[in-house]
Amino acid sequence: MPSYSGSARASSAASFFSLCPASIRAGLFGLAAIAAGSGGAFAQDAAGSDADLVAKGRYLATAADCAACHTAPDGGKPFAGGYGIESPLGTIFSTNITPSKTAGIGNYSQEDFARAVREGVAKDGSHLYPAMPYTAYVKISDEDMKALYAYFMHEVKADDAQPEKTALPFPFSIRTSMAFWNLLFLDNTRFKPDAAKSAEWNRGAYLAEALEHCSTCHTPRNELMAEEGDKALSGSAVGSWFAPNITSDKTSGIGGWSDEELTQYLRTGHVAGKAQAAGPMAEAVEHSLQHLNEADLKALVVYLKATKPIASGETTPRYAAGKPSVAEADLRGLPGQAMNKEGFHIFSGSCAACHQVDGEGNNHYPSLFHNTATGGDNPDNLIATVLFGLQRTVDDVPTFMPAFGPNAAFTDRLSDKDVADVSNYVLSHFGNGRVQVTAADVLRVREGGEKPMMAEVAPFIVPAIVAVVILLALVIALLVARSRRRPAHA
């Protein structure tokens, strides 16, 4: 709509009305009054519509968990970026997505915004790394994208902070290489409802596959770090942590959970006798899942319980392993096991006060048996919890476990062997005693987890390129030298 100055509009009206007879002027004044009333109502409707769109965008941004990655910890401004995402290729720092025109997305059109969110391409044409889960956000509908844009542009406070730039090692520093990766692995289609399924299932699928981007963490990846679609949600390493199998398989996945237990876990991150959220899942619960309405939580559960079951090899559910055990029994040695005095002493000094001597826990700290962190075949989450601790806040109530790794106080810090000893103590007494943790396992988790093939070969890429260039130069030089030695033809 064009805009006009108030004085110009008043002057034009005065000139027009001065030429009208009194009766016409009276009629026009009446019409003007009616028009003014209806115009005010229209303006109110428009304002209400805009407010509704922004409110919808706020809810969608929460469901998409944008704040978890785009807000730096320890007092960072909302959505101003700077959160360091540890990846196998190096630390990726999140960008400023406030409407700042100098540091954020204030100059983005709605089309620019949609392209960045769905395709991982910024307004200036630079490519984003898939640590930003655009491979899932690509499924977000046009209507929801409009609401998201309205929220970020009209409610999020602009902040001119310039977060630290991502600087991955060569060749991953060449962002244009992501164009080739996208060509191979990005399915640029929106979510399509399944007419054969219920509206509730479709809502759950949209939430899980697009906004909540569950597959980003819970689906295994191939050598080029793309998701393996045929193994969707069957579990995958996420840096130091392990995102477990959440398919409907009754043993390996969540098929043995009740709908009420799953809903409670998504909303609170804790189900007694089953599991508690730590690491990236704790962030998802704190920043996103606890804020979803009951209908959406139920829809997510309906979808997850209907996913294709994929067995991961477990013989019993992760949450079913273990039982209470008297800690002092370790001094005598359990049947068929060597004594683990080192693990016993660490457990007694650092763990038993909260988790109890028999591992049963209390109202504030979970039991160590019937616990997915101790009952599964993969001990990474147990190791990571000991090293990095646990923090999540639900309904303004914090849940906390201190870290015993690199960020712990010097007197509380445990070595790799210490963590292995206490992990083995906990596993043998309260969880899956078949699993053994070594100091090398702890070091791997401490340093960010298993490195994918791309990260393993990265140190050799530059020398290989240099070697190829030198070899080509030598071949060219040899060919030139040979051509100069040939006799000239008459």
Image (cartoon, rainbow, N blue to C red):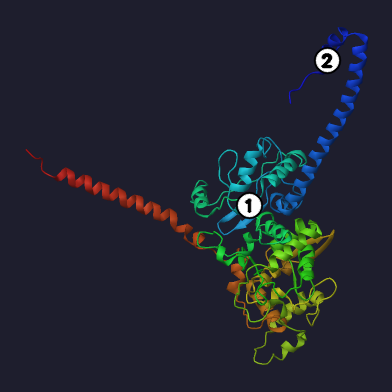
Which numbered dot is residue 239? none
Left or right: where 151 falls relative to 235: right
Number of the label disc, if any, that sits on residue 139: 1
Q: Quadrant of the N terminus?
A: top right
Tell me if residue 178 comes above or below residue 125 in the rendering: below
| On screen, residue 487 above or below 247 | above
Question: How dense is the environment of label 2, judged by Cα within 10 Å: few (below 14), some, or many (20 and up)?
Answer: few
Q: Residue 215, percent across and down? A: 63, 61
User: Between marks 2 and 1, how big is the CA–CA gap?
Assistant: 49 Å
Q: Residue 261, how many percent across, how many down?
A: 78, 70
Q: Nearer the viewer, residue 194 or 348?
A: 194
Q: Which residue occupies the extreme left position in the image? A: 490
| Image coordinates for residue 210, horizontal then vertical, percent | 66, 55
168 in relation to 244, above or below? above
Q: Quadrant of residue 441?
A: bottom right
278 is higher (above) or lower (below) than 478: below
Q: Is residue 235 rendered to the left or right of residue 42?
A: left
Location of residue 21 by image quarter: top right
Identity, as a three-letter code, of the amino acid under mark 2: Ser
Point 85% across, 14% down: residue: 10
At horizontal 70% and vertical 47% (from top left) the residue drawn is 144
Given residues 166 and 311, the one toward you in this image is 311
Query: Which type of secondary structure does the marked residue at label 2 adopt?
Result: helix
Number of numbered discs on residues: 2
Residue 423 appears in the picture as rendered: yes
Quadrant of the rendering where the C terminus is positioned? top left
Q: Is residue 361 left or right of residue 97?
A: right
Query: Could you tell me which residue is drawn at 52 percent across and 63 percent down?
Result: 222
- Mark linked to residue 7: 2
Amino acid type of the residue that numbered disc 1 sits on in the rendered structure: Lys
